[in-house]
Image: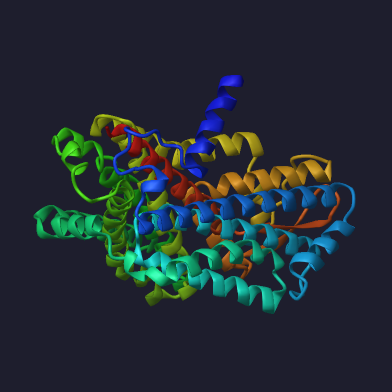
């Protein structure tokens, strides 16, 4: 137990401190000897990291208040609503759920910005000001006072960096990797195979669904084709993404170019983030190339533009998280094969192991209430609600189940973010979140942490 606490303390120190030993860093020099621009970027990253941590603490406090209110004093829901979302007319318990989601969203985006600002990414400046404007709008329109916890660090960083915008640029590693990938045959071959498989499975789904001489409801056919194509696309993404990032760092070691990189002006943050962006840029190209396949469903009806955008978001966020796992394992292993095996192990665990474990532990409580079926897991309302929320979290962590449940909420209940479900134990109702919300928040946070850890690992591997 003591050793675990020590490791946790070291991890927090690595992420939120500046304690890399001298002589073992790729590009690290003592703070007092840093150039002004380097010092500015590191301070900006630390401010955003501490802002993310502050938002996370606020979210935990809000969760504690919500649990206490649900079990003992429901008046606390009203107090939380008035304090943090006063101008949004909605049920008090639903407001509490939205407040928690909003605070966690700010924490996730701050973590992402903290990871990439050290790589001097140009888009971080615009994202920071955009997030500031979004929180100010939420504060003025809905009374989202918790947004101040994000506005403060964002404004601080924005004002610190506005005088030196030339510090930010397009990532040279990303540009080089993307150009190299698209100049060869392999990049186009992967796209061709990807679209060929998508086309084959789409035609197969259509032939299996359309009976000979029968009558088909076109809306149902369009929806089934869309979900089938989405499922196939998600499975292909799960097996393609780890292969693109698992060798990002280990390949440099195997080619004996890793030591040479230390003699260049490329920082480790620029290297890691650039490798990530190049892989994800290629994945984005794959996703965009498959949109015509998904759009076939519009010919039959039953699918809206909102469903298409939601599906693209889930696919993109899942690809980002899986890519981050590949990058992380590439930073802690010596061989590409070992990093690839670990990446696929995580991918299989998330897509196969997690739903099986959740089904055994929580008895599909969340899926049942989304389908208007009684959960029937306990006669105690508190226990039943706990099962539903825990299953909601587990469902949200699995891209396949999160996509299916989010589509169900949108299609069957016309609810994009939240909906109310009835407890079978006492007939009362509770609010739940659509899985895509939690999936986006958790996956972006995990991605940022993995990138930060990968950067710190590279600092200690030099020297």
Q: Which of 54 and 317 is in front in this view?
A: 54
In this view of the protein, can residue 373 be seen by the observer? yes
Residue name at image x 39 percent, y 33 percent: 21
Indicate left or right for 272 with 127 as reference: left
Q: How many numbered badges does the structure rendering display?
A: 0
Residue name at image x 16 percent, y 60 percent: 179
Displayed quadrant of residue 422? bottom right
Residue name at image x 54 percent, y 65 percent: 156
Report x, y in % for residue 113: 46, 58
Please state, as top left, top right, bottom left or bottom right, where the C terminus lies in the image: top left
Residue name at image x 55 percent, y 68 percent: 155
Check the image and name the residue furthest to the top. 2
Whether residue 238 is situated above or below residue 170 in the rendered picture: above
Report x, y in % for residue 353: 48, 35
Report x, y in % for residue 273: 33, 52
Q: Nearer the viewer, residue 206 or 60?
A: 60
């Amino acid at each position: 137990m003591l050793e675990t606490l020590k490791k946790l303390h070291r991890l927090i120190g690595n992420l939120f401190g500046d304690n890399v030993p001298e002589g073992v860093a790729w590009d690290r020099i003592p703070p007092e000897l840093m150039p002004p621009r380097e010092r500015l970027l590191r301070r900006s990253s630390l401010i955003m990291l501490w802002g993310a941590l502050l938002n996370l603490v606020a979210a935990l406090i809000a969760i504690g208040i919500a649990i206490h209110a649900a079990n003992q004093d429901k008046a606390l829901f009203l107090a939380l609503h008035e304090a943090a979302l006063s101008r949004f007319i909605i049920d008090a318990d639903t407001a509490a759920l939205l407040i928690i989601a909003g605070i966690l969203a700010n924490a996730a985006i701050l973590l992402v910005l903290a990871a990439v600002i050290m790589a001097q990414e140009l888009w971080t400046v615009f994202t920071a000001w955009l997030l500031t404007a979004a929180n100010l709008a939420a504060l003025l329109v809905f009374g989202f006072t918790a947004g101040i916890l994000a506005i403060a660090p964002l404004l601080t960083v924005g004002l610190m960096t506005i005088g030196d915008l030339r510090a930010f640029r397009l990532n040279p590693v990303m540009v080089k990797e993307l150009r190299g990938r698209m100049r060869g045959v392999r990049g186009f071959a992967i796209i061709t195979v990807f679209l060929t498989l998508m086309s084959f499975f789409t035609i197969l789904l259509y032939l299996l669904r359309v009976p000979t001489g029968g009558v088909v409801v076109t809306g149902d056919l369009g929806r089934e084709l869309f979900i089938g194509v989405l499922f196939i696309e998600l499975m292909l993404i799960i097996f393609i993404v780890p292969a693109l990032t698992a060798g990002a760092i280990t390949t440099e070691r195997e080619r004996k170019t890793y030591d040479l990189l230390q003699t260049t002006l490329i920082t480790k943050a620029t290297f890691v983030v650039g490798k990530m962006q190049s892989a994800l840029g290629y994945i984005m190209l794959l996703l965009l190339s498959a949109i015509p396949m998904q759009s076939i469903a519009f010919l039959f009806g039953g699918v809206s533009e909102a469903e298409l955008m939601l599906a693209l978001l889930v696919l993109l966020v899942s690809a980002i998280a899986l890519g981050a796992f590949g990058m992380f394992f590439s930073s802690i292993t010596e061989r590409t094969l070992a990093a690839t095996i670990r990446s696929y192990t995580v991918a299989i665990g998330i897509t196969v192991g997690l739903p099986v474990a959740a089904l055994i532990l929580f008895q599909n409580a969340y899926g049942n209430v989304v389908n208007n079926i009684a959960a029937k897991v306990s006669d105690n309302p508190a226990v039943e609600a706990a099962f539903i929320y825990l299953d909601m979290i587990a469902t949200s962590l699995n891209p396949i189940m999160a996509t299916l449940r989010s589509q169900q909420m949108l299609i069957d209940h016309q609810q994009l973010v939240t909906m109310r479900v009835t407890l079978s134990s006492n007939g009362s109702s509770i609010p739940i979140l659509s899985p895509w919300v939690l999936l986006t928040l958790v996956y972006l946070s995990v991605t940022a942490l993995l990138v930060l850890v990968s950067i710190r690992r590279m600092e200690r591997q030099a020297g």
